[in-house]
Image: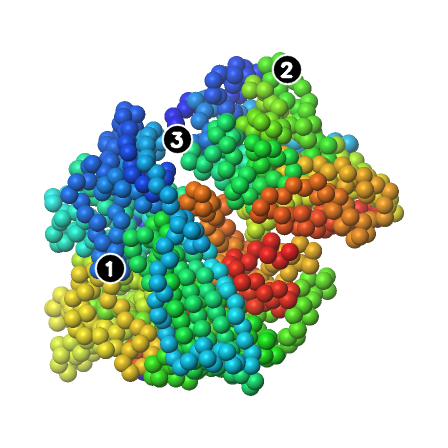
Amino acid sequence: MRPFTYARATSIDGIHAVQSATGARILAGGTTLYDLMKLGIETPGHLVDVTSIAGLDEIRSHQDELIFGALVTMSDAAAHPAVLQRAPVLAESLSKAASPQLRNMATLAGNLLQRTRCAYFRNGPEYPCNKRMPGSGCAALDGLDRGHALFGGSRSCIAVYPGDWAVALAALDATVDVHGSRGMRTLEVANLHRLPGDTPHLETVLEPDEMILNIRVPVGRLGQASTYHKIRDRESYAFALVSAAVALELDDGMVRQARIALGGVATRPWRVPAAEAALAGQRLDRAAALEAGRVAFADARPGQHNGFKVALGTAAVADALMIAAERSPSR
Amino acid sequence: MNQTIYPDRARVDARDKVRGVTRFAADMPMQRVAHAMTVPSRIVRGRLAAVDIDAARAVDGVLAVLTWRDFKGVKSAGYLMGGGFGFQSHQPMLSDRLVHRGEPIALVVAETLEIAIEAAALVEASYEEEQFAALLGDTRAEVLAPQPGHDMGDAQAVLASATFRVDAEYLSPAQFQNPMEMIATVAEWRDGTLTIHEGTQNSGALKFGMAAALGLDPARVRVESAYLGGGFGQKNSLQGQTVLAARAAMLLGRPVKLVMPRAQLFHTASFRPASRHRIRLGADADGRIVAASYDADMQNSRPDTFRASFSEITARLYAIPNYTSTARLVRTDVQSPGYMRAPFEHPAAFAFESAVDELAYAAGRDPLAFRLANDAETDPVTGHPFSSRFLAECLRDGAERFGWSRRDPAPGSMRAADGTLIGWGVAAGAYKAAMAPAIARLRVRADGTTRISLSGHEMGQGIRTAIFAAVTDGLAIDPARVEIVIGDPDAAPQHVTAGSWGTASSVPVVRRAVQAMQARFEEFRDGRPIRGTIHEMLARWRRPYIEVESRLQAPGQPDTVFDRLQRGLPAAAGPEYEPFVSFSYIAHFVEVRVEPTTRHVRVPRIVSVVDCGRIVSPRTAESQVRGGVVWGIGAALRETAEIDPRFGGVLNNDFAEYVVPVNADIGAIEVGFIDRPDPLLNEAGVKGLGEVAMVGVAAAIGNAIFHATGRRLRELPIRIEHLF
């Protein structure tokens, strides 16, 4: 680990100048950043600890919206009664992620920015990786790609976005309030992450001096009938082989609207509008759910070792839809 | 015959462990300790062309950056299975030759761990790379001529005419032990004496191996290994890092601590090699297994020969009159593989017990009844009797506890109300009942204390608790003031504590020591009345202490075997003794539940019944079985080293990605013991337990998955993709 300087910020005003300095990074829970620093992937010269900034650790439950401060921990959000009741997909995406120790430390905004688990990315300079070292190539393309993307990949990179929370947020059309030296702006979570294209080292649309302050989730008729269904290699402390974030509005068994986002299989949180459209106006039964799953994976481009995720993902989407439907106040 | 029924008792060191009082090697408080960090090689095979250490040395707080040029005069301590002391013969940093990915090319020593890590990252190297083979099936791997194994009758001819036949290949991946306590060395050089603090299962090999490597008088090498945070065979011999840390301590004149990072341990310590198993079985119309043929391939390193013995148990699980086996070693460019928990028996039982299950189905027999009908009464290999064998009792008792009689044999026939597929599977396992020579010194003092020093290491399996049970059995001493000294070659010669011979070697020798103490006490007493404990009597007689020494080797071993023990060389024996054969046995009954949509497999319950002779420490014994079964679940469904043949090395080299089970993956595990003393192996009636616990678990799970789904899966780990 390289030496770095450290400062604690107590307000958002003034951190941007420091942040813009070469190699400075924001430090919150540290669960991703420290890990990547130990691996030598992140080498910041300066850390700005934002955990002492007041007012960013609250969850507010409004009529049509849940608002999460950037510094709310994963465990606090997962256990919050309003989140559990109004949008179980959010709570589940958090409680099914990482381990209790990590969830107690990691923050909701930091979670959005976690980086891929691609082993070639994480394992050092002997492995070509365009994300870690632009232009060096991609070892995963012809390599062990069991954990790699079926959607959104490029010839430069097929690394999966590993998170769960962002997938659930994308399903619910959540937004983030972002503060930078040029003021505040609002972004859709679904557009926060970039496709890798030829520049896989650029992962989000955030400017170097920007920081996420709030995460806003519209919850109304969509939310309660929702679930985050995550399939993984063990029951806890594992990234998704495939996951489906699903939210439904049902009217007497008919789908008024459906939202489906996929995790573990794409280079960024992956909404599948075609599958959502296929369900609209349909009676939700097992056959319709399976068909939606098939539509969701129709454009999948599997590699050598991840082809099973088409069938697995189809089943996971279908299961998720049936679980969500069970939770609908009006089936 | 040991008639003692040992009571349930808490682990003697549990209280210290949960309070953090127990000191593991890296916890040793020490003045002026310097911290070391290794720089791993970034190639698999070739030559280290140049190392640039200037940037590392310039970091404030760096004490030294050592390269191979600083190790002149240091030698390899040799390979454990080749007359030496190390897990492999290749000692890193003795030359510019590189033979496996991740081997250390430099050692940074600094005032703090953080500085050492920082500086290690600044060491730059250039290499001359050579082609290599990373995997068992790699075209550059060298396949050696088959070694003959067991050969009874005429297996090929009988197979050809058998009524029912199975011919299948099974695969087992490379796996890593991953003990919680990483391999850690604290080396201290003072007044011409080298002291090594390291959690090792083989402090004797460290003592003599370090002396050989560094050219020291063994009397000038002290090794302390009072506790390990798990070993599982990975800590069974001298590690390359121990030599590096010791050399640094000697050059610097300061204690040096080196704790290997987990990621590096995937490349610097031993592991379970990948293996391939072709099994052919034949049964006659009456459902008797008449012939078996077993041909295995097993991964090896280039320099060392780690022999395969998969057939040692499979030739004996059943009364198969015609049996043949071979094993081919396949040389690849890796560190030398070694003895990871049930090293041969786990993959062998997966292959063989899966094949037996397939044969039972082919013959239209219930898998349990089929196994019972083919039980062996005498050893098919030697024709000698088994010292004790209660495998059939394990199977019957397990079946009763599990409710096997309610099983519908048809695959895919059992379902839960929600459509979940239910499968019930059974498999048997065995492991040699080995013993190592051991020496015990027992001293009972007038001041109320007792000290027993003997051969053995505490890896967490509970050997101290078993020793405590034996030393307090029938001796009038204060049980609260018993000191157990193990893992210290200067207190008593140390055997490598492995191969499940720990309890079977220590408890009988302690019983002998207790008997000797009783005899000596009677001599001193000379007919005087006994009032109180031995301590009180000694005080009354104004004798400070009585000390006795006892020694015991495996049946049939000559007394010269104690010379090997005293020189830190492997000295265990088994399973073939003249004129009997000894094994421990186990039967596992497994329920799996398979989600019909996602094919997700869960293991809600397992019943395991063990015949390991007399149980000395019921609580730690049961705990060992649970641990072995958990490992079996992990090995069956999760654990594998991900290796890209283009690069070598293990990609999933941390606990996030090397997937072992978490608590939520583990359901009910019911453990039963036959608890009948073995009449021949030793007077305590103890056979081994640690390894056998895992043997057969993976096969039972695979068999249960077949029963649930109709899918026969022959490659470990069985993962979700295999069920689509």
Q: In this rendering, is residue A326 above or below A213?
A: below
Q: Secondary structure at mark 1?
A: helix
Q: A262 left or right of B661?
A: right
| Amino acid at pointer 1 | Gly
On the image, the x and y values in percent for residue B450 come to: 22, 65
Residue occupying image coordinates x 59% and y 76%:
B362
* Foreground disc of the pair 2, 1: 1
- Residue at 50% x, 78% y is B160
Residue labelled with disc 2? A183
- The N terminus of chain B, quarter of image: bottom left
Pointer 3 with pointer 1, Cβ within 8 A: no
Viewer-side residue, B259 vs B464:
B259
Q: Give the secondary structure at mark 2.
A: strand
Real-space CA distance between mark 3 and mark 1, rounded to the nearest whole angstrom: 40 Å
Q: CA distance from mark 2 to mark 1?
A: 71 Å
The tag earlier along the polypeptide, 2 or 3, is 3
Q: Chain of mark 1?
A: B
Q: Chain of mark 3?
A: A
The type of residue carrying mark 2 is Gly
Tag 3 residue: A1
Circle 1 residue: B82
